[in-house]
Amino acid sequence: NLKSYLTSNSDTTHVGLVINFDNTGNINRKKKYGRNSMMLNDFIHTSNGFIIVGKHETIDSTSINYNLIYFKIDSIGNVLWNFSINEEGTLNVIEKQDTNYLIGGSFFLGVTEDALLIAIDSLGSIIWTKKYGSIGTGSDKLTSLIVRPNKLILGNGYHSFTVTDDLGNTPILHNVSN
């Protein structure tokens, strides 16, 4: 019996949702994670469950706290371990590299974002973290990863920026003609 898991950005109560379907699309079970605002963006199957990545926002009467999150569940949805990184942004994608895992996403620096790549071991401990991009040059996001057998890591995403005139006014529309 083929089983597959799907993560959803959020349900109506803004918590993370994991759904287990059978091979004909019927729901076997579903489980909610987090409170307030949690978005689950990607997952990967492991030998004894799944690792899930996303972001979580907690809101209280005086502030909003942002965290990048990743956690592992067993085959029936019980949390085995969970970690958060106190950064505003999102974790978008996870891939396996040998016995470790690579997580890609982005984090905010003021009004722009920079790309983020994190390596974790099978227990969720961070091995290394790399950040890509420069303050003031626009937003950089890492949205997908492929790990090749020769250990080459391929990632893609996008870079966005705002064009301004010499006085800092935006946007500028250019007419280009031959």
Image (cartoon, rainbow, N blue to C red):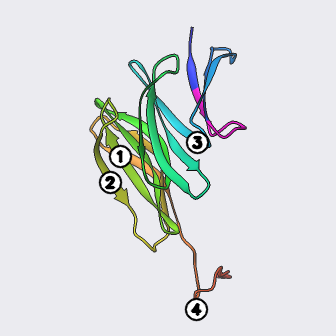
- Measured Cα–Cα span from mark 1 to mark 3: 18 Å
How far across and down, in percent of the image, does residue 147 sit? Answer: 36, 39
Q: Check disc 3 and report the residue beneath it.
A: 39
- Dots 4, 2 in contact, CB < 8 A: no
Residue drawn at the location 68% of the way across and 18% of the way down: 25
SS for dot 1 = strand
Residue matched to label 1: 118
| Chief secondary structure of the magenta portion | loop
At numbered mark 2, what does the secondary structure look like: helix, strand or loop?
strand
Instruction: Tell me the quarter of the picture where residue 151 sits.
Output: top left
Q: Which residue is mark 2?
A: 130
Return the disc, 4 or 2, that comes first in the chain's sequence.
Answer: 2
> In this view, which residue lies farthest toward the front?
61
Which dot marks residue 77?
Answer: none
Whether residue 132 is visible here, answered yes or no, is: yes
Q: Is 78 or 92 nearer to us in this picture?
A: 78
